[in-house]
Image (cartoon, grey):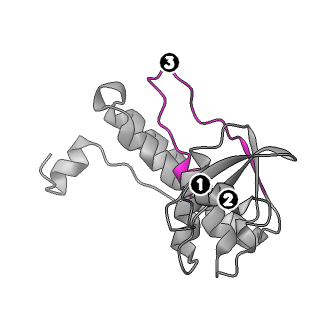
Amino acid sequence: YASADPSLLELAKFEGKSGQVLTLPHPEAKAVVFVGLGDEATFETIRSGVGNAVRVVKTERAVTNLDKVRVDGATRAVVEGAALGGYQFRAYKTEGEGLSIEILELIEGNEDELGEALITTEATNLARNWVNTPALDKAPETLAEEMREAAEAAGLTAEVWDEDRIVAEKLGA
């Protein structure tokens, strides 16, 4: 709250409750976004708060200090919140703007947590893309190949079964 006039926060009815987000003009940046974390900050309130904030930021670059909150995994919570909260499936959208933010700077991020969060969120958003793509636009063979490639890229092995194998295994196909 140090950079906001308390009367503005009061006028906007911003109380810092979990789920609250408030954007105000700022003399040193385009805007400052306040994120409510509730009475006690937790991994989940940080993650959720950043996800909410990402959807209101109207710039390509944002800086956050929420990774400095004294909560185990704060950096991971910030990165997951931004990447998962900012996810949009836009494969069929020709109109309207997507989310603007492309760069999120952390003040003092933990590199190990950052790496873990990037792996988790990239996998989650890839799975979201697969789920959100209509079956009409994705043949089972294509989907299976994409999944096999993703598994191999992660250092895993994947075996893709064809229809004969599925029948042999009595999986009801």
**Which region of the structure is painted magenta?**
81-105
Residue drawn at x 29%, y 43% as measured from the top left: 162
Q: CA distance from mark 3 to mark 2?
A: 38 Å
Label 1, residues with CA under 10 Å away: few <14, some 14-19, many ≥20: few
Label 2, residues with CA under 10 Å away: few <14, some 14-19, many ≥20: few
Q: Is residue 131 left or right of residue 25?
A: left
145 over 34 or under it: above or below? above
Local SS, label 1: helix
Q: Are marks 2 and 1 in contact (CB under 8 Å)?
A: yes
59 over 64 or under it: above or below? above
Pick whichever of labels 3 and 1 is earlier in the sequence. Answer: 1
Residue under numbered circle 3: 95
Q: Which mark is residue 7?
A: 2
Instruction: Indicate the amino acid at tag 2.
Output: Ser
Residue drawn at x 77%, y 72% as measured from the top left: 110
Residue under numbered circle 1: 11
Q: CA distance from mark 3 to mark 1?
A: 35 Å
Instruction: Indicate the amino acid at tag 3.
Output: Glu
Quadrant position of the N terminus in the picture: bottom right
Residue drawn at x 65%, y 81% as measured from the top left: 71
Local SS, label 2: helix
